[in-house]
Image: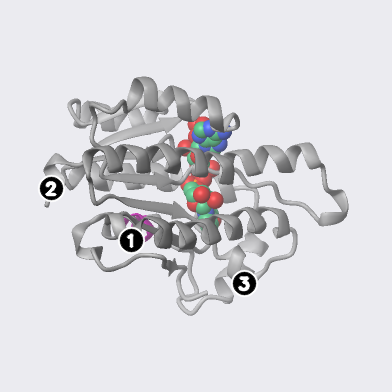
Amino acid sequence: MATDESRNVLLTGVSRGLGLETARGLLEAGWTVYGISRARSVGWSALERAHPERARFHAADLRDPAAAAEDLFASFVPYSVPLHGLVNNAAEAYDDLLTNLDLARLETMFATNVFSAMALSRLAIRNMLYHRTRGALVHVSSVSAHLGFKGLSLYAASKGALEAFSKNLAREWGERGIRSNCVVPGFMETEMSAGLTAEDRARIYRRTALKAATDCASVAAAIRFLLSDEAASVTGQALRVDAGA
Ligand SMILES: NC(=O)c1ccc[n+]([C@@H]2O[C@H](COP(=O)([O-])OP(=O)(O)OC[C@H]3O[C@@H](n4cnc5c(N)ncnc54)[C@H](OP(=O)(O)O)[C@@H]3O)[C@@H](O)[C@H]2O)c1
């Protein structure tokens, strides 16, 4: 089995939030991280300075999943790079009441949150088959797909699709040693949730067992676990890390 020191992972959404935290933890554990977001951020640039050999970056816009996936696998992680992991973390949240539905915005969100995850998983699995890597896919879902929140039906539907996709991939590729799991975070204090009022936050926290936001570092640790050999028997699962929501 490969050690973390010789492992390569493709991670989307590295510019901030959970993706940046996940990249930090994986780099500290010795992984080489092939990071994607639309632009390099100050936080990511600091990781590049700390890990110049193993923090690699490519700008990509996942709203065009087919073009982004083809480009990434042609020039950023070509077949000469054996992939051991893929983390589909990048996402956008289109929050609104259903009666205000704008189908074009919904299509864009599904392109980013679901279709890009499918297009990248397809090419990551092909890479893993080529190298006979017993690789791991981790998709970042949301507790909204399990609990239900007013105004989140559209976003939650994209995460429900991702969870169903992951569970079926686990069956499809398990016999080749490839695992697929989801992490299901609760409310994290990142840019995605910055629009919530203090009142909204207090209400969400009251509904958790821990009466707190979900810690990004805790979710990032769960992602690292699911990528690792310690999770060798874990596949087809949706692991909730949600402060007891
Ligand atoms: N925050 C929460 O409370 C919460 C709760 C449950 C689940 N989640 C899930 O956790 C994951 C991480 O969320 P977060 O809170 O860290 O969000 P965030 O702070 O908004 O970060 C989102 C990341 O995705 C990237 N991204 C967005 N659209 C992209 C596109 N079209 N192409 C390429 N990259 C794109 C962003 O990079 P650029 O904008 O630089 O391209 C950024 O790096 C997401 O899957 C989210 O749905 C979040």
Would residue 130 appear left or right of 61 to someone viewing this image?
left
Q: Is residue 60 above or below residue 100?
A: above
Q: In front of the other: label 1 or label 2? A: 2
Query: Is residue 32 within the magenta segment?
Result: no
Among the 4 quarters of the image, the one containing residue 57 = top left
Residue 19 on image: x %, y %: 40, 44
SS at mark 1 in the image: helix
Tag 3, which secondary structure?
Answer: helix
Q: Is residue 40 visible?
A: no
Q: Is residue 218 magenta?
A: yes
In percent of the image, x 43 and y 34: which residue is there? 15
Amino acid type for the residue under numbered disc 1: Ala
Front residue of 191 and 152: 152
**Residues at marks 1 and 3 touching, judged by CB atoms closer than 8 Å:** no
Give neighbour class at mark 1: few <14, some 14-19, many 20+ (Cα, 10 Å): many
Q: Residue at x 54, y 55 (%)?
A: 162
Q: Give the residue pinned by disc 3.
A: 147
First in residue order: circle 1 vs circle 2: 2
In magenta, the rendered stretch is 217-221
Q: Amino acid at mark 2?
A: Ala
Query: Residue 214 falls in which quadrant of the image?
Result: bottom left
Between the residue at mark 1 and the residue at mark 3, the CA separation in whole angstroms equals 20 Å
Query: Marks 1 and 2, Cα distance to the nearest angstrom?
Result: 19 Å
Whether the residue under disc 3 has CB within 8 Å of ligand 1:
no
The type of residue carrying mark 3 is Leu
Which residue matches tag 1?
222
